[in-house]
């Protein structure tokens, strides 16, 4: 095994919370490998500083706007460049679309090798100037990047077919979770009963669940509409969601949307939970009606927790959900078809159970984050050796 002790890696993302939600296991695993890690992003929640201290990762604040803003983006590049030069990193790892380009430019100027985990936000966009713009940005970023990794295996062919990056620079990173944590067998019936009581979920309720950022593009409006219709037929149905509100994000759903839709008495919207494996254990059916996604972590967690899944019929979801085998796929933005798929599982508990068991088996075989970390380290090693 290569010796990485003392090698300095900077993770660059848009916001601080992404390191907690998306990259926690990667960071801790890389620390064990001997890497010295820094996390660079906007600081939206000052309390997150304690998280970075706890896991031994240096946090460096660099404001990064979510929206395209030429002046602000140039300023971000300049700030990143100064940080990169001052810290003398051995490698930069950019994450999330906005930092893909800005981080690559700054790394190139600082003469530091850079790898990128690509997430094509343009994938579900119809042919349009906007889609062509985002593809162009990806091509520019890829040209400045030493190596591009994709989470979703389906994106490998997409990037090649659009000539975004040459095959010799493109690798499949994959995605996964800590399967020892997201294990339904580790949460007892007593613990589930205690948590249900704590959250005020009726003991007899059938729980429909979802998780994700509280924005419209995650399909919460369609989910609430579907639940409203189903609740008329199933009086013991309960809706449980868990997610995050980010100050810098546009398109957030109102916190009182369940009240506006008349379902507040049977809906609970949780925020900033750190015990998602326990929250998943309360759900009978997991629903993920997103409008677009690259490789949703929520689906991976739900599959690992053996939950029957209803998800949007998009390539980002198809990598986890095979229709009729590990879950059900429905067209996005259609609350009626969404309600129909949920009702099908409510009416056929045996079928729902089989889907959940198949999802768990798929997760065990394909969604282990330990293997993802091993592939990332292998890519780091390749780039670091080439930079000698």
Image: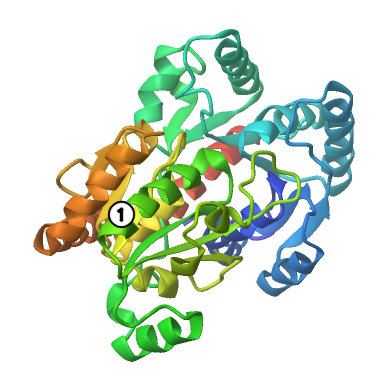
Element type at marker 1? helix
Q: Position of residue 73 (x, y in %)?
A: 82, 28
Residue in the picture at 31% in, 74% down: 205
Residue in the picture at 84% in, 34% down: 76
> 311 or 316, which is in the foreground?
311
Residue in the picture at 79% in, 48% down: 42
* Quadrant for the C terminus in the image: top right
> 353 or 344, which is in the foreground?
344
Determine whether, in the image, residue 349 is placed left or right of residue 63: left
> 159 or 144, which is in the foreground?
159
> 190 or 69, which is in the foreground?
190
Q: Position of residue 219 (x, y in %)?
A: 47, 42
Which quadrant would residue 80 be assigned to in this image?
A: top right
Q: Which residue is mark 1?
A: 230
Evaluate whether residue 8 shows in this view. Answer: yes
- The residue carrying pointer 1 sits among few (fewer than 14), some (14 to 19) or many (20 or more) residues within 10 Å by Cα, namely some
Which quadrant would residue 53 be assigned to in this image?
A: bottom right
């Amino acid at each position: 095994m290569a010796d990485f002790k003392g090698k300095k890696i900077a993770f660059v993302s848009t916001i601080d919370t992404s390191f907690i939600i998306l990259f926690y296991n990667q960071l801790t695993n890389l620390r064990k490998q001997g890497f010295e890690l820094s996390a660079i992003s906007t600081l939206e929640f000052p309390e997150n500083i304690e998280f970075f201290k706890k896991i031994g990762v240096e946090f460096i604040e660099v404001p990064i706007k979510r929206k395209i803003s030429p002046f602000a983006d140039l300023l971000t590049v300049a700030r990143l460049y100064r940080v990169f030069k001052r810290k003398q990193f051995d490698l930069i790892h950019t994450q999330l679309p906005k930092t893909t380009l800005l981080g690559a430019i700054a790394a190139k100027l600082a003469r530091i090798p850079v790898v990128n985990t690509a997430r094509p936000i343009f994938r579900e966009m119809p042919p349009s100037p906007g889609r062509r713009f985002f593809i162009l940005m990806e091509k520019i970023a890829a040209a400045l990047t030493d190596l591009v990794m994709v989470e979703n295996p389906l994106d490998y062919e997409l990037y090649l077919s659009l000539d975004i990056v040459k095959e010799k620079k493109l690798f499949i990173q994959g995605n996964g979770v800590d399967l020892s944590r997201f294990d339904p067998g580790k949460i007892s019936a007593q613990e589930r009963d205690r948590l249900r009581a704590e959250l005020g979920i009726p003991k007899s309720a059938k729980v429909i669940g979802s998780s994700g950022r509280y924005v419209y593009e995650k399909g919460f409006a369609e989910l609430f509409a579907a639940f409203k219709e189903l609740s008329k037929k199933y009086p013991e149905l309960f809706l449980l969601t868990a997610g995050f509100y980010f100050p810098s994000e546009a398109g957030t759903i109102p916190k009182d949307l369940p009240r506006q839709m008349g379902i507040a008495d049977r809906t609970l919207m949780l925020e900033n939970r750190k015990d998602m494996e326990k929250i998943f254990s309360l759900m009978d059916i997991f629903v993920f009606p997103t409008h677009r996604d690259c490789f949703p972590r929520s689906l991976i967690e739900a599959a690992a927790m053996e939950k029957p899944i209803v998800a949007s019929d998009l390539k980002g979801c198809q990598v986890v959900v095979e229709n009729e085998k590990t879950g059900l796929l429905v067209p996005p933005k259609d609350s009626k078809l969404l309600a129909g798929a949920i009702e099908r599982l409510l009416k056929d508990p045996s079928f729902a159970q089989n889907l959940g068991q198949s999802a768990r088996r798929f997760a065990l075989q394909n969604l282990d984050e330990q293997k993802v970390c091993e592939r990332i380290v292998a890519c780091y090693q390749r780039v670091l050796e080439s930079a000698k």
